[in-house]
Image (cartoon, rainbow, N blue to C red):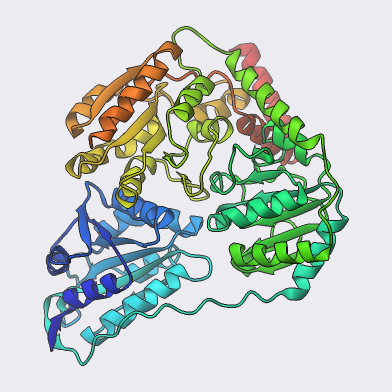
Amino acid sequence: MKKTGAWLATYALEQIGARFTFGIPGVHTTELYDALNNSQQITPVLVTHEGGGAFMADAISRLSDGIGVLTVVPAAGLTHASSGIGEAFLDGVPMLVICGGPRTDSPHKFQLHQMDMHKFMSGLTKATFKVESHAQVVSTLFEAYRIATSGEPGPVFVELPVNVLLYTAEIAELPRYQPAPPTSVGHEANILRAVELLRQAKNPCLFVGWGTRDAYAQAKAVAEWLEAPVATTLQGLSCFPANHPLHVGFGFGQSAVPAARNAFKHCDCLLAVGTRFSEIATGSYGITVPENLIHIDINPETIGVNYPAKVGIPGDAARVLTQLLAALQAAGPKPAERPALRPQIQSDKAAYRQTWYKTDVADRVNPARFFDALRQQTPDDGIFVIDDGNHTFLTAELMPIHAPKSVILPTDFNCMGYAVPAAIGAKLANPARVVQTIVGDGAFLMTCMEILTATTNQLGVVYYVFNDGALSQIAQAQEIPYNRKPCTTLGQANLEGVALATGAAYIAIGSNADLDAAVRQAQAFAAQGQPVVVNVKIDYAKQTAFTEGAVKTNFGRFPLNEKVRTLTRALARRITG
């Protein structure tokens, strides 16, 4: 039988369970888009910018059993998408990046969009492929999918030259995708060593990251068996329920909230699962990790890198924790009770929230009261999509997350502009769930026109824009050492105008008194399939624990001469104004 490469690519995507593709068609991909349009399984989604399409594909992978797929033109389409591809790469998110390519049957050089895309993609993907013939299309996409979803997941790039996509060729057979069988856990000796350390510990603690997203029940069971407090990484906010009495918050060093700092103060054995101990997760490496560190991660190259591990176990978190729990239970009775632990965590959380309530002002919205209203009116499985900025850490500290896979956000690559398009992918993947976005005004301005894609597809997403007219996270970091805040004041954008331009509803929240009614109204609009822009006049006067702690930690890591220089300059500018 004769088939085009575009038909074969669509067949391969159907075989691996893809439901959506994201991109903008161009001369190299018209045949591919025509084939996708004929699919009964796959919906090609037109975006306003390929960068937004990459963030949508990222959200599909994070919040569904399928994989996010980009279908872009070479050169400009690919470079536009590269920020979202890089975000997926550093965050461990699978993605297929399918890109058209210049003709390979032409002797001419300097073709339209001709560049070395594999060199460009080599640092942003797990692997790259260039299909040379029709016979390679299906097998290459199957292999790309296998690589993207195995081990530590990540994006894989596939170039499909336009002549392969457009022309027909004889195909002998069409293989069906066969998933690889799960690998056995193994590591019995290290499991037993971990059990020994945990049973000897008086104050064991858990630190869980994104790698435990499919081990929610197992992490909870291990924590309860050990009666151990649990902190999460930023990306792992929804990997342990915040309404569980052993949950202490995001992080555990001096950049963490008091509940976490106090609960981890005397930690003598740390069980870290699905985390790389990266800069944000550790508050700029401002944590104290005990000698008895048990580090579990699917990527063996991350284990013990930033903090030496007494026991390292490479493997899938759900399988390893299942085996660890069974070994703990077989080793003897549960550890002794820690009767003061849960009441102390509850008391510390309540006291920290009170410090926020005391900062109420008449003409601004208190972040803690905003998140109170949002939590009260959002079902436990509601999805929150968070952008990068000061609002990120406000959410991490003040918004209790109750269900697995209910928060996604950019970390490590830290792309501003992530949330607006990613929320669209979240809603496509989970149409029955409430999807709401927390985004700062600076990040919102980067990708706000992508709301048009939500309107076109009748996706009811609520965009809460924390509006203070500045890049506040950086402005706060500038204020103390420089006594000035260059290039952080934003232009005065009319958010109601953005809503009008993109077909969204518009709501303004100017004070705490407006909160309950506004959240209710926004969710009502969204329930009817209309996106909503909510302009929140936020009060950023109080700094988060993360910001205060990270500034101190970073300063503490300076050489002595740089500390003196920084302090001298700050003091001089305070005196001279």
For image coordinates 53% across by 76% down, the residue present is: 182
- Residue closest to the far bottom: 172
> Does any portion of residue 22 appear in the rendered image?
yes
Q: Looking at the figure, which quarter contains the N terminus?
A: bottom left
Which residue is more in the foreground, 569 or 316? 316
Question: Where is residue 316, by image quadrant?
Answer: bottom right
For image coordinates 34% across by 79% down, the residue present is: 177
Question: Where is residue 338, by image quadrant?
Answer: top right
For image coordinates 20% across by 58% down, the residue present is: 44
* Residue 13 percent across, percent down from the top left: 28, 70
For image coordinates 39% across by 23% down, the residue present is: 467
* Residue 212 percent across, percent down from the top left: 58, 56
Q: In this view, does 170 lie to the left or right of 124?
A: left
Q: In this view, does 111 lie above or below 514?
A: below
Which residue is more in the foreground, 309 or 28? 309
- Residue closest to the far top: 362
Q: Is residue 405 above or below residue 510?
A: below
Q: Looking at the figure, which quarter contains the C terminus?
A: top right
* Residue 173 percent across, percent down from the top left: 23, 90
* Residue 376 percent across, percent down from the top left: 47, 27
Question: Where is residue 136, by image quadrant?
Answer: bottom left
Q: In this view, does 560 lie to the left or right of 168?
A: right
Which residue is more in the foreground, 163 or 556? 163
